[in-house]
Image: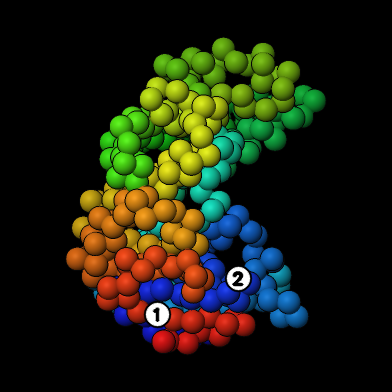
Amino acid sequence: MDADFSPGFHLLLGENAQGKTNVLEAIYLLATLRSFRGLGSAPMVRHGQKGYFVGGTVVSQGEHEIKMYWSPQERSLVLDGRPVRKLTDYLGVLRTVVFCTEDLQLVKGAARIRRRFVDLLLSQSSSAYLPLLQRYMRALRSRNALLKRAIVDEVALESFTGELLAAGVEIIRRRQELVPKLSPLARLAYRRIAREAEELRLEYLPAVRKDFAVELAQARRRERACRTTVIGPHRDDVQLLVNDRAAAQFASEGQKRTLAIALKIAQAEYLTGIHGSAPVLLIDDVMGALDAKRRSGFLPLLEQARRTGGQVFMTATEQNWPRELGRDTQRWTVEAGALHRV
């Protein structure tokens, strides 16, 4: 499907399994090179096809043309006619924040999901963060491979330990700086949506308590027993507290859903503050599940996107799209994978 989307609010209407989410998926893929549903590349290939192609023109401060192709045999990413060699040369051309049912896992899921959320936001706001994270993960994988051997090469282990410490200390510092900035934004968003006096707070829980080098050295015996690196920022978590109680254990399903949306609103507002313009907002069948009171919590974010000339894409069925968002909305129908402007 091909479409030309102007700035503003775009409503994608259609019955289930017609391809509405695929439009959002394609936009998110151009921004992050991954699926927001946690899919690998192979499941995104249409049945009977060899691969998939996604392309687009992004207009912000400048204009950029993106072409992406993936198949089991061939992969290419081209920006402005040139193959992309380093991700840092590409990421940031398009910034998006997605709201989807999978967001509930930010509250209910494993710590790695919350780490990924923090790391994505740091990557979206600083070009230096992704190379830092990649450097840490390379050292971690190499170090773990050594620890799995029956006889460990101590010289090589020390070399990778030094690399792990250098990158790890900086990752911890950046996460420690981000979470206190994100917490008040999430708290305000939560209040707007829930319209209740509950207090939301985000708390960074680093696996390293004080000194990474000291604690890593002290864990050497445990590492040999477990044959893996047992301490470091790859084991960090962000605790979500509602009225000082852990949301994962004590919050209701409604509170968890509200909290997940508040985290994404905080992400969007943080990026707007950093870059001066709103990211593209992708809202996948979330608004229809909220009552009018909770939907109104979105309105300041949507108005902010409109004021800055941003874009909002929302999927819904004809029955559950929020009529109060109808002003200046461009409507599209999606049927059997075809997109038509109403």
Vertical relation: 305 (above or below) 71: above
Q: Say how the picture is coloured.
A: rainbow
| Residue 71 found in image quarter | bottom right
The secondary structure type at the circle numbered 1 is strand
The residue pinned by badge 1 equals 331
Q: Position of residue 267 (x, y in %)?
A: 36, 48
Question: What type is the residue that disc 2 sits on?
Answer: Asn
Among the two numbered marks 1 and 2 on one chain, the one whose residue lies closer to the N terminus: 2
Q: Is residue 176 visible?
A: no
Q: Which type of secondary structure does the marked residue at label 2 adopt?
A: loop
> Which amino acid type corresponds to the residue marked 1 in the rendered image?
Arg
Q: Position of residue 51 (x, y in %)?
A: 67, 76
Tell me if I can see residue 324 in this picture: yes
Q: Looking at the picture, does residue 197 appear above or below residue 58? A: above
Left or right side of 9 for 289? right
Looking at the rendering, in which quadrant would you find the C terminus? bottom left
Q: Is residue 182 above or below residue 95?
A: above
C-alpha gap between disc 1 and disc 2:
17 Å
Residue at horizontal 44 percent and vertical 53 percent from the top: 290
Callout 2: few (<14), some (14-19), or many (20+) C-alpha neighbours within 10 Å?
few
The part of the image, by quadrant, that contains residue 22 is bottom right
Q: Which residue is drawn at 73% across and 77% down?
A: 47
Residue 110 lies, in percent from the top left, at 59, 36
Query: How far across and down, in percent of the image, does residue 139 sit?
Result: 56, 37
Residue depicted at 50% across the width and 62% down the height: 285
Residue carrying label 2: 16
